[in-house]
Every structure is written in C-alpha cells, then in structure tokens.
Amino acid sequence: MSIILITIIIFQKIILRKRIVITEDWLKILNAFPIAFYISEYLYKYKFIKDNFNRKTVLIFGSNYGENENKQLLSFIISCLLVSFTTTNLVLEVKFGLSFLIFLYSILIAIVISSISYFEINMRIKKNVNEIIDILPYFVGRLYTYLLSGMTLKKAIYISVESEKNYFNYELLYLVENLNNGESIINEIDNLLTMINITSIKRLKSSLITFIRVGNIESLENIKNLENDIMIERKQRVKIKGESLKVKMVFPLILFFLGTVLMLTVPTIMSLQ
C-alpha cells in the first residue's frame, strides 16, 4: 500500500507537476497501522498546519503556494515509511533483513521526493528574489522622480507599482492599503522591507525612513544613489548564478547513483529469499 501511495506522489509531483495536498482522507487510509497513523495525525494537526498565512510566505511563494503542502507531504512520507516497514515485516512475514532493505529503499524515495521539493522551493525563492532585484532600480527611479516633484510618499508608492503585477508590488499595495486604515507609515515600511532579506531592500528601508523623518532634498539623494547601486548588484547576481549552477548538479547525481544501486540490489536479494 505504501509503495502505491508513494508512487502516486511521485507521479503527481514529477510527471504531472501538480501541487501535493495531503488531506485527512489520505491519512485515514493508514488507520490500519496505528503507530504510523497517530504519528502522522499528530504532525498533521499540531505541528504542520497553520490557519494564518504569513505575508512573508505569500511574498516568497505566491498566494497559491505555501509551505503547508510540503509539510503535509513530509508527514505523509513519514507514515509511508513506517507502513512500509510494518507491512513487509509483519503482514508479508518476510525476513527482517529484507524488510529493512525495503525500508531503506523507501527512505531513499522519501529523500528524493524531499530533495525535489527542497530544490523547487529554493528555485521559487531565487526566482522571486531575482524578480525583485530586476524591478527594484526602476521602482526606485520612479519613486525618486515622484517624491522630487513634491508628491506624498503614499501616493508615490501607489503610482510606482500599480502598473505592474508581481509579489513585491502586491506587498507595496498592501502597505498603502494599511496606511489608508491609519497605520504608521514607518512601521509598515519597516515590517514589509524587513521580511525581504536583500541588501538593497535594507538600504531602501533606511532611506525611506530617513526621508519620512527629515523630508529634505538631501535625504532624497540617498534614494537616487541607491538606484545605481542596485544595477551593479543585478550584474553581480547574474555572474554568481552561472557559477553556482554547476555545484547544484552534484547532489542530484549522488541521489541518482544511490537509487540505481538500490533498484538493482533489492530485486536480486528478493530472488534469493
């Protein structure tokens, strides 16, 4: 049963490229195996499910993709591993060595699935970070022009981002909406830009807060200078991206090698039983 369920996950995740959503109905299938079921039920209800969606998660993954699906998937994989060991050792009544080998094989499958999810999450994070870096110099340039013309910061932010739809602009529009509800502009800027761990964003936060407090032309020059520095950072990121691509291929190759060895070893040992 666990092999069938893991195969379904692999088919959904790799071939169909669908989001994995493990529901309570899936977990109830494991009710015949109390240890696996109760562990997964505990993880599902008390550790891995969050009712409130953190805005940082929305910013990184997008409004329709969050960490809950991956954590539910991890919970389900743990259950499948326990079920795999239980069924092969007790239900099928095979030797302990063989059941343990199949258990190790299931662990390898779980590692592969987790690695795919890990790399997918990191690719999404890097994609959105690069997206922010790409649009940031133009946003800063427009913001500087509007502020220099005497426009209020709230209106300048709104006009600067309303024409394009992306995660960063979505959060800035959310910030403007909070300002309309009476929130402090310094607190909102600090809360939003602190979530984005990019050096240029930290400098933008400092420059905007300085402008709010001082409100003179000199403080605007910091924003103008930031535009040039971000363009330099963009070029550096492109160079680093090319160099790191080779390193990323090492871990998947190791997993592929181990998987091939186990796939050849398990049938051979089973035929000797």
Image (cartoon, grey):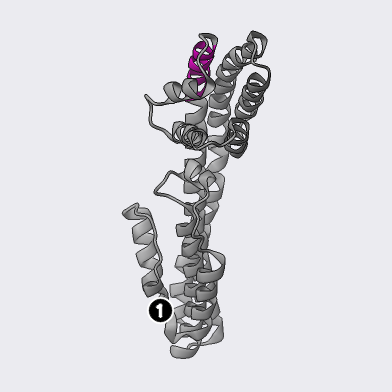
Quadrant that contains the N terminus: bottom left
User: Which class describes the residues within 10 Å of circle 1: few (<14), some (14-19), or many (20+)?
Assistant: some
Residue 102 is one of the magenta-drawn residues: no
**Picture quadrant of residue 148:** top right
Above or below 19: residue 171: above
Q: Is residue 131 visible?
A: yes
Residue displayed at 47% across by 83% down? 88
Q: Where residue 200 sits in the image (x, y, percent)?
A: 61, 25
Q: Which residue is mark 1?
A: 28
Q: How many marks?
A: 1
The relative height of residue 237 versus residue 14 in the rendered view (above or below) is above
Q: Decide if residue 139 is on the left or right side of residue 212.
A: left
Residue 105, given in percent of the width and then of the height, sits at: 50, 69
Q: Residue 221 or 5: which is nearer the viewer?
A: 221
User: Is residue 126 or residue 11 the one in the foreground?
Assistant: 126
**What range of the chain is rendered magenta?**
135-147
Is residue 273 something that shows in the picture?
A: no
Q: Position of residue 33 (x, y in %)?
A: 47, 85
| Residue 102: x %, y % from top left | 49, 75
